[in-house]
Image (cartoon, helix red, strand yellow):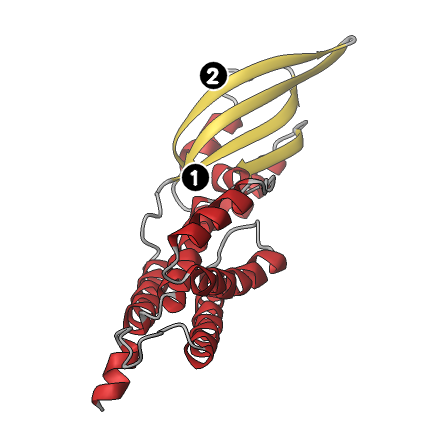
Amino acid sequence: MNEIWQILDGRSTTTDVFTFENVLLSLLLAFVLGQILAWVYYFTHSGLSYSKSYVQALVIMTVLVAMVMAVIGNNIITAFGLMGALAIIRFRNVVKDTRDIVFIFCALVIGMASGSQRYSIAIAGTIILALIAIYLYLTGFGTHQPHNGFLRFTLPGHIGPKHPVPGILKRFCGSFTLISVQDSGFGSPAVEYAYQLMIRNAKKNELMVSELGKIQGIENISLTMQEQLLEV
């Protein structure tokens, strides 16, 4: 039992901790923990920028970092050599979501813990990070209400004080602001309107658009939620 705890705690009874068996165990553990991290990302992802290659990269990155740590070992010269080699590599992919960057950093740390044979830290850290990610997903932590949205449409003429559009917007929105009015030009009476909305209940967006569509002469109704714009 004491030997098992020593293995999990990263301590070995031998003088050379980076034996073939230990390195193989580190890589296998990094592979298992990397898959757990990738599965957690897969199940808790709610944006529009999902990438299959990114999920697979999380697993490979965890194993790769563990391998790098095994290559470095206790040799500081090898460490500087690897730093110089990695400095040549240029990554041009832009990560749009901050949450994706956090998962990359998690994969790096788990790989470092596994590769340096600090197995207890790697296992406990992965479990805690997974539970935190699942908790934040299930509780919707950080969700901001009301929802921001942009509404665009065209009307034959300008909106007067008694026009039905403001009345409909008051029913579904906490507040709304007219941000632009533009004549179509070329002798057309159509006027393009753009509103910024603070929507009370996003589930009633279709009903609001349907009510606007009943107004005589209204065309080209377009409602875009700001949260969707930020995910693209």
Q: At label 2, which amino acid type do we have?
A: Pro
Q: Determine the CA span between mark 2 and mark 1.
A: 19 Å
Side of 86 relative to 69 (left or right)? right
Asked if residue 14 is positioned above or below residue 165 in the image, the reply reads below
Residue 69 in sight in this render: yes
Residue at the outermost left position: 2
Q: Nearer the viewer, mark 2 or mark 1?
A: 1
Q: Report x, y in % for residue 227.
A: 48, 41
In the image, what residue occupies the spot 42% across and 51% down? 77
* Circle on res. 172: 1
Among the two numbered marks 2 and 1 on one chain, the one whose residue lies closer to the N terminus:
2
Q: At label 1, which amino acid type do we have?
A: Phe
Are the residues flagged by discs 2 and 1 in contact, CB closer than 8 Å?
A: no
The N terminus lies in which quarter of the figure?
A: bottom left
Q: Nearer the viewer, residue 169 or 130?
A: 130
Q: Name the residue that disc number 2 marks.
A: 161
Pointer 2 local density, CA inside 10 Å: few below 14, some 14–19, many at least 20: few
Find numbered disc 2 in the image and state the secondary structure of the residue it sits on: loop
Q: Report x, y in % for residue 107.
A: 43, 59
Asked if residue 53 is positioned above or below residue 168 in the image, the reply reads below
Find numbered disc 1 in the image and state the secondary structure of the residue it sits on: helix
Q: Nearer the viewer, residue 108 or 141?
A: 108
Side of 14 relative to 203 (left or right)? left
> For residue 130, what is the image quadrant?
bottom left
Q: Report x, y in % for residue 114.
A: 38, 68
> For residue 40, what is the image quadrant?
bottom left
